[in-house]
Image (cartoon, grey):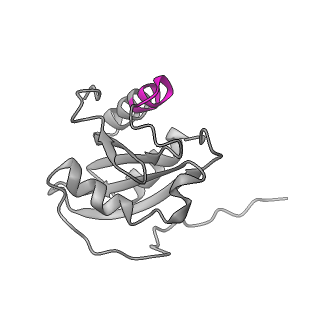
Amino acid sequence: MQTQLKELKVVPTGNTFESVKIMSSKNAETVIRQFYFEDIDIYESCFILLLNRANRTVGYAKISQGGVACTVVDTKIIMKYAVDTLASAIILAHNHPSGELRPSAEDKHLTNRVAEAAKILEVTLMDHIIITSDGYTSMADEGLINV
């Protein structure tokens, strides 16, 4: 039995948001916060924001949703979206339902893993933002991203 090969296409789906130029971590946090609702204090979710060479948003994607303490983030899925949209940069974001703004050791490890994978594809990991209902932390602003 032969398997059929399918043509793959990038087709935007879901909610749409206005494309904006990302100028700072605060600007990125404002855009990312639109993806979260009352569930921000319930379970952890991870999103990516995809940017072109002019730092304008070209898309976003929900990467994972987990429980109250963690979510599994697959680097391959992040890179798939970056390649599919021909993104030049990505911003990784996730929430901490606990309200803790400090990045955990796992957060730092994920950041380094995504940055290394992105570098191979000539994509820049611009930031990893952790948000809570009360605030945010930019790992780039804290000097925690090795580009």
**Is 22 situated above or below 123?**
below
Relative image position of residue 128 (x, y in whole percent): 35, 40
Frontmost residue, 32 versus 99: 99
Q: Position of residue 111 (x, y in %)?
A: 40, 32
Decide: is 37 above or below 45. below
Q: Looking at the rendering, which quadrant does residue 31 occupy?
A: bottom left
Q: Is residue 108 magenta-colored?
A: yes
| Residue 94 belongs to the span the image colors magenta | no
Give the mark count: 0
> Which residue appears at 39% of the width and 76% of the height?
16
Q: Position of residue 121 (x, y in %)?
A: 34, 39
Q: Position of residue 45 (x, y in %)?
A: 53, 51
Q: Residue at x 39, y 37 (%)?
A: 101
Residue at x-position 56% and y-position 48%: 44
What is the quadrant of the N terminus in the image? bottom right
Would residue 40 appear left or right of 51 to someone viewing this image?
right
The C terminus, quarter of image: top left
Q: Give whichever of 2, 57 is nearer the camera.
A: 57
Task: Point out the stretch of residues depicted in magenta.
Answer: 103-111
Q: Nearer the viewer, residue 92 or 6?
A: 92
Residue placed furthest toward the right: 1
Main SS class of the magenta portion in the image: helix
Left/right of residue 13 with respect to residue 139 in the rendered view:
right
Side of 12 relative to 6 (left or right): left
Residue at the image position 45 percent from the left and 47 percent from the top: 94
